[in-house]
Amino acid sequence: MKRILFPILLIGSPWVTMKGSSALPGESAPASDQQLTLEGSKVASAHAHYLLARQLESEGHMREALRHYLAYLEQGSFSEMIPHIASFAAVYDGLDAAMDILDRAIESQPDNPQPAITLTQMALTRAANDDQLQERAAKVLARTLEKFPDRAEVYENAVSYYLALGKKDEAQSLLEKALLVKQQDPLFWLSLGRSAQELWPLADSDHRDAHLPKINPYLAKATALALGQGNEEASLQAMDFYLFTNQFPEAIAACEAVVKQKGSLEAHKRLWRLYDASERPAEAFEALSKLVEAYPQDVEHRRYLALHYRNRREWDKAAEHLEAALQAGGGGLSDYLMISNLLLVGKDEEKLDRFTARGEQLFPQDPHMGFFRASALAQLDKFKEAVDLFEKVSKTAETAAPDLLDDSFYFSWGAALERNGEFDEAAQQFDRSIQLTPPDQLERAARTMNYLGYMWLEQNRQLDKAEQLIKKANELVQNEPAYIDSLGWMHFKKGRHAEALKELLRAESLMEELAPEDAEILEHIALTYERLDDEAKAKEYWQKTLDLDPTDEEIRQRAMKGLGMQLPESKPKHPSDEEGVRLP
């Protein structure tokens, strides 16, 4: 059987369906599905007038809409529409008609303060100079305050009304009495706090210190009640109120209490931001760490935490949190590049190898990812693979990303070539790096010059060019121990041992604290003393070299030899290197 659809029913229509009908506020269910009751008829008639009034209003037929709104009111008391209808009546039928509507609404709805609030507002906005009407409004206001002592909107209206008429004393007296009300709803006190701020504005910098003690009692009540009831929403509203009034300690205290009550993600976020805005970095970092711990899937704040770790130069933890954010929320090339850079700086070789390999698979055509992968391979001592990838990336980048081919790129490529034993090819890339280094980046230029010059010294080739490069590096960046060591070693290679010793000892004196990787400087001094036939000093520096526990095994063995010590037997690096050992 097909369902029959009926048009919208108008006044007097004998047709009405009660089941599934759209109810108006205050509408009750019909007594019978078979017979339209008198109450049902009134509701249906009201419904029809209301729908027609809304339609006419939307079409701009305001007078006709008002007639149907008034007919709608005649069918029953639907309080939420009274302010709207009264406003219509004031415009088209006059203020007296509007007041009449509101008087009848006040009488018919004794538990609803809204008609009385609308009456006082309308009297204020439409007839502020009508003394008779203002006296009438004041009486309504007084009765409403007496009848609804625990309704926030009544106080808000009264304070606005008094202030609009310049009656600040009445507004102040009202708010002070309100502090004695036994109201347990924190939102009530927040509302009164907003009203208090109208009376005692905090924007007035000259009186701010005097006004704060007037306003804070309302906020204190709201905060205590909200926290006592475990009402997080109200607690955060109180916190916001403190924040907007620039009371950071109070805002932080409220937010800390919410978080301690196992607050939501939003509460944790606000606490972190409050600490950050208050320039309390240690507490901000701790709050952010706890936020991520409590809500590990929150990608945004994991990224913030990663940035904090990066600023603290804790590269491994920064990379860890960025990778977790990547896994939780996805990401693109920029995420892979940032994580690769952190792993590269942090020298986490295992993760760097794994991560850059995955990145290259995901973004095979992007030269930036290839550059990081090549750098990773070089760091992992896979120099042949690194060199091949650098060459491939350089060709791709010529058209896809020419900005990538800067001095740093060619320096990294040259270093990989040098470590792979391709010295002439390495020199070509170092020369390109020097040429491309921006004029204002003297330190980068000096680094490359020193690297290339020292490479030629170690190969006993191009010594004159090495001298030019190393002297230029020392001219660009003065008192750099590594560069001074290269200068001394250059003199050594050219047989100028006295000059060599002078520079090498200067390099040592500039080192604040020697690390194992600095053993090479001490080795150079020991070798120079040997050439100068000062055996005692040579042995002194060989011992210093050994005491540093050098990371380079070849330097260690040369130091032991210089001291006349027996060299340890070389151990096989892998069981398969040992005779008679078979791997399964």
Image (tube, rainbow, N blue to C red):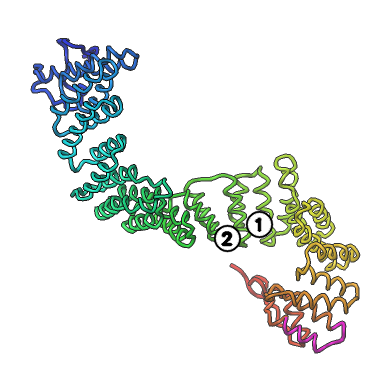
Q: Is residue 574 left or right of residue 318?
A: right
- Write down the quadrant of residue 573 in the picture: bottom right
> Tag 2: Cα neighbours inside 10 Å, few (<14), some, or many (≥20)?
many
Q: Nearer the viewer, residue 571 or 104?
A: 104
Residue 157 visible in image: yes
Q: Earlier in the sequence, mark 1 or mark 2?
A: 2
Q: Residue at x 81, y 61 (%)?
A: 449
Helix, strand, or loop for circle 2? helix
Is residue 184 within the magenta segment? no
Q: Position of residue 393 (x, y in %)?
A: 72, 47
Q: Which residue is mark 2?
A: 315
Q: Is residue 493 above or below residue 91?
A: below
At horizontal 24% and vertical 12% (from top left) the residue drawn is 7
Task: Answer few, some or many: residues within 10 Å of disc 1's Cα (few below 14, many 20 plus, some between 14 and 19).
Answer: many
Q: CA distance from mark 1 to mark 2?
A: 15 Å
Mark 1 vs mark 2, foreground winner is 2
For mark 1, give the secondary structure: helix
Report the number of numbered marks.
Answer: 2
Instruction: Residue 376: give its label.
Output: 1
Name the residue nearer the viewer: 14 or 96: 96
Q: Amino acid at mark 2?
A: Trp
Q: Which region is colored magenta?
A: 530-544
Point out residue 118 in the picture as x, y percentages from the top left corner.
24, 29
The quadrant where residue 311 appears: bottom right
- Side of 191 relative to 467 (left or right): left
